[in-house]
Image: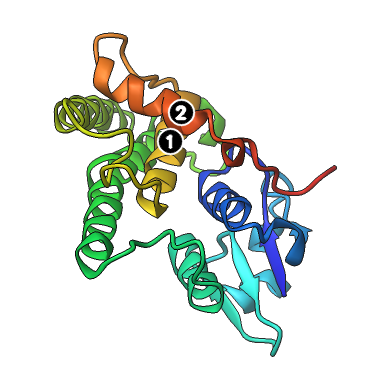
Amino acid sequence: MKLYTENYPAPNPRKVHIYLAEKGLADTVARVHTKMAARMHKAEDFVKMNSLGQVPVLETDDGRFLSESVAICRYFESLHPTPPLFGRSPYEQAEVEMWIRRSEFRLWTPMGQVWINDDPRTAVVNPNQFKEYGAHMRKAVMGAMKWLDKELSGAGPFLVHDYFSMADIVLLCGLDFAKFVNMPIPEEFTHLTRWHKTVSARPSARAEGVKV
């Protein structure tokens, strides 16, 4: 199999890198460096694999293609169920899914709009930035962090109690990219900070994409 991917700070490829490291599969999948700065993800050959022109993309052994980071990880989970990262029981599986969706809608969605509309680094590819909207979405990101901090008060070390899961991976990558877009976790959000330090200390959090 081949994983068409990009290095940090690209947040969606990073989810897959962390997942593969946690599963002990990091060395079993060939990495193809798809340099976003060089617009390789928009090249004609790449778009044939993923019409949206986004990384990561997984090419399976039989020549088929999967995109979307969580979907790619679910594919690997079916092939390699141990150790489980999508829940140990039916209820935990639902909790992991719940937290993935919460992270995507409450944090990732507004964060993406900030990156697109209110960051000078994306102005080259998006000359029609809607800066007022981007600035408004910054408030939404801070609101999401405040809500997460409250949810994590009195909670275990991870989103699903004592169990590190794909949900933690999704939220970690989202918060770290928010920091890259100049929205770090405020110091007063002590519960969220505690959680972030816990998951960031795992060796998988430093997993590499493509060695260059």
Location of residue 63 by image quarter? bottom right
Residue 109: percent from left, percent from top: 30, 46
Does the CB distance between marks 1 and 2 fall below 8 Å? Answer: yes
Question: Looking at this view, is 209 or 10 the one in front?
Answer: 209
Q: In this view, does 1 lie to the left or right of 42?
A: right
Describe the element under mark 1 as helix, strand or loop. Answer: helix
Colour logic: rainbow
Residue under label 2, please give it: 119
Location of residue 34 by image quarter? bottom right
The residue under label 1 is which amino acid type? Trp
Placement of 161 over or under 55, stated as above or below: above
Query: Which dot marks residue 115?
Result: 1
The answer to whether any part of residue 128 appears in the image is no
Describe the element under mark 2 as helix, strand or loop. Answer: loop
Residue 119: percent from left, percent from top: 46, 28
Residue 86: percent from left, percent from top: 37, 62
Location of residue 212 by image quarter? top right
